[in-house]
Image: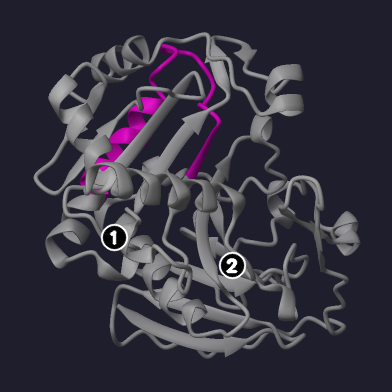
Amino acid sequence: MKKTVTTLADGRELIYYDRVDDTVRDAVDKRPLDAVSTSSEIRRDPLLGDSVAIASHRQARTYHPPADECPLCPSRDGRFSEIPDAEYDVAVFENRFPSLAGDSGRCEVVCFTSDHDVSFAGLTEEQAALVLAAWTDRTADLAALPQVEQVFCFENRGAEIGVTLGHPHGQIYGYPFVTPRTERMLRSAAAHRAETGGNLFDAVVARELSDGDRIVLEGEHWVAFVPYAAHWPYEVHLYPRRRVADLRELDEAARTEFPQVYLELLRRFDRIFGPGEPPTPYISAWHQAPFRAPGREEFGLHLELFTIRRTSGKLKFLAGSESGMDVFINDVPPEAAAQRLREVASK
């Protein structure tokens, strides 16, 4: 992998990740851009104790542009985009409309490929491995920023999820605090250690392997399962068999096998509801340990993949119980979801 760091016309950082080591990236951003102006602010909710990012400048962000005006496609034929080069493998740049900025953290966009018309599931294993390398490298670089406490790599896919740009891409958030979801996991892990002397993440994986009913697929270095108390209609958690705290700690064997396992999961998601159905909307999210929080060594890196589609033509909405009280109600039994995801395996 070759990494090339450059800047866009307004000073934002742009990083190319290339599979070929002798690739030259010297294209210049020719757009007459003004400097980025953000109003990101973190406010603490006194009742719940969590943090909310207030970012009014995001109201002006790009919204459902036509394909020939996509800002994530390469710059070609006199049309300039966020990527100055005429093609690329993987590109990462600072978001022009960030939720978090400056002392309040950092937001980046990850373009998985220059091909506008594919999805992550359509990438080759070599391309998917390069995306994993980019996620890992960005985690390492953001870990060095004093204002970043935790890195979150994720992909929102589909208009139903709220995606406003159709190009295959994801995002990376560098939070200036430990997220509430991660804090809850760390508290649960600490309680489990105190009660049993063991690690909670190890126990979760061991239970799923022992039960077997919710296992979706297994590799030598990864295991994927529908969790016992799944919140979403179709939800899969992907764990490395060797527990690590974040992406930087994966060994070479796990990195090599990851594209095979992950691409198979994504392709199964697109087959859940049968032939003729539109692509399945999903959120794919890496859960990594915070960098400096107590209990980091207890955390288990994992990826959570889920869809809000509960059946053909119907979505799972977060209504009164979920949105008002944070109590989820799932219409699809986890065992049934796992069975369906096994049925749609690649032949």
At a point 38% along the width and 42% down the height, the residue shown is: 122
Residue 27 visible somewhere in the drawing? no
Q: Nearer the viewer, mark 2 or mark 1?
A: 1
Give the distance between the C-alpha atoms of the residues marked 2 and 1, in whole angstroms: 21 Å
Stretch of the chain drawn in magenta: 259-284
Q: Which label was assigned to residue 74?
A: 2
Figure check: 20 above or below 128: below
Q: Can you say which quadrant of the picture contains the C terminus?
A: top left
Q: Can you say which quadrant of the picture contains the N terminus?
A: bottom left
The answer to whether residue 239 is left or right of residue 274 is left
Q: Which label was assigned to residue 77?
A: none
Q: Residues within 10 Å of mark 1 (few under 14, many from 20)?
A: many
Residue 307 in the image: state x and y as whole percent. Answer: 52, 28
**Which residue is at the front of the view, 98 or 347?**
98
At a point 55% along the width and 30% down the height, the residue shown is: 281
Residue 108 in the image: state x and y as whole percent. Answer: 61, 68
Figure check: 321 above or below 108: above
What residue is shown with label 1? Answer: 129
Q: Earlier in the sequence, mark 2 or mark 1?
A: 2
**Which residue is at the front of the view, 305 or 53?**
53
What colouring does the structure picture have?
A: one colour
